[in-house]
Amino acid sequence: MIDKSSGIPVYKQIEIAIRTDIDRGVYTVGVKLPSEDELAVQLGASRGTVRQALSELASQGIVKRVHGNGTFVCEPGNEYKIENDHFISFLDGLESSGGPVDTFVLDRQVVRANSVLHEAFSGSLQLYEIRRIRKKNGKTVMMSCDYIPMDLTPGIETRYQNNKSVYDFLEAQYALRVSKVKRVFHAVAAAGDIAKLLCVKAGEPLFYIVQQAYDEYGRCVDHANLYVISEGMHFSIISSR
């Protein structure tokens, strides 16, 4: 029950109570939670306060709210740590959390740089495009589209053989070592081919990440557009003061 004299907001107490029940196995992955009305009666709170608590849990990826169907417990996601002094690739982050990670190349081709990519690569006209999906424990978690400048990677169209890590490939084949990465995060809704490739419904939330990798000379050696299922990935940022 809720303790209104504790000084802790009621919605936060409800959030903690539901999270505790999930951790204890009262509600397991995929299980539908009681309705807002039922939870309100059980916990002695208003429906609006229960709704606020569920929204907080949904924003943390702990539950998933499906319009017209109810609220369901999510599968624990992979935590991806962002540290100022150390770069970790998404592949490294996925593998470090345990379980098999599989990479599937959808297609690869030579393309001409558009205005955005032309600026990123300082005049490189021809790029090698690689589209891939990654699965964690058999479940699709992200789709990526990488662009690599062909003037720095001669013969890449024959050398690249569906390598799991593009960065490892660039270092091994061309001595291009990634020393700095810039990432810009966007929240978007799944649509069209992206929704189909990620096996999600149109409108479901995704992370859209624009990622640029630079070598020790400041040259952009890889520009990637990443789409990550938000339910399966959580981010924590570690900074030093």
Image: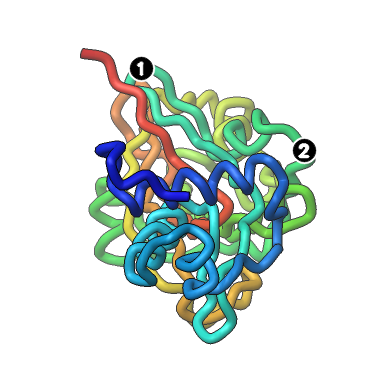
Relative to residue 61, is residue 56 drawn left or right? Answer: left
Quarter holding the C terminus is: top left
Residue 17 seen by the camera = yes
Relative to residue 72, is residue 224 drawn left or right? Answer: left
Mark toward the start of the polypeptide (2 vs 1): 1
Camera-nearest residue between 153 and 54: 54
Camera-nearest residue between 48 and 170: 48
How packed mark 2 is, by other alpha carbons closer than 10 Å (few <14, some 14-19, many 20 or more), is: few
**Which numbered circle lies on residue 99?**
2
Which residue does the image show at 35% across and 24% down from the upper left?
238
Q: On screen, 92 above or below 194?
A: above
Q: What number of labels is visible?
A: 2
Residue 15 position, x and y percent, is 44, 50
Circle 1: element type: loop
**Which numbered circle lies on residue 133?**
none
Dot 2 amino acid type: Gly
Camera-nearest residue between 147 and 74: 74
Dot 1 amino acid type: Asp
Given this view, does label 2 or label 1 mark the residue nearer the observer?
Answer: 2
Circle 2: element type: loop
Look at mark 1 in the image and give the residue it sits on: 85
How packed mark 1 is, by other alpha carbons closer than 10 Å (few <14, some 14-19, many 20 or more), is: few
Residue 194 seen by the camera = no
- Whole-angstrom CA distance, mark 2 to mark 1, is 26 Å
Q: Quadrant of residue 48?
A: bottom left
Which residue does the image show at 35% across and 39% down from the upper left?
220
Which residue does the image show at 53% across and 37% down from the upper left?
79
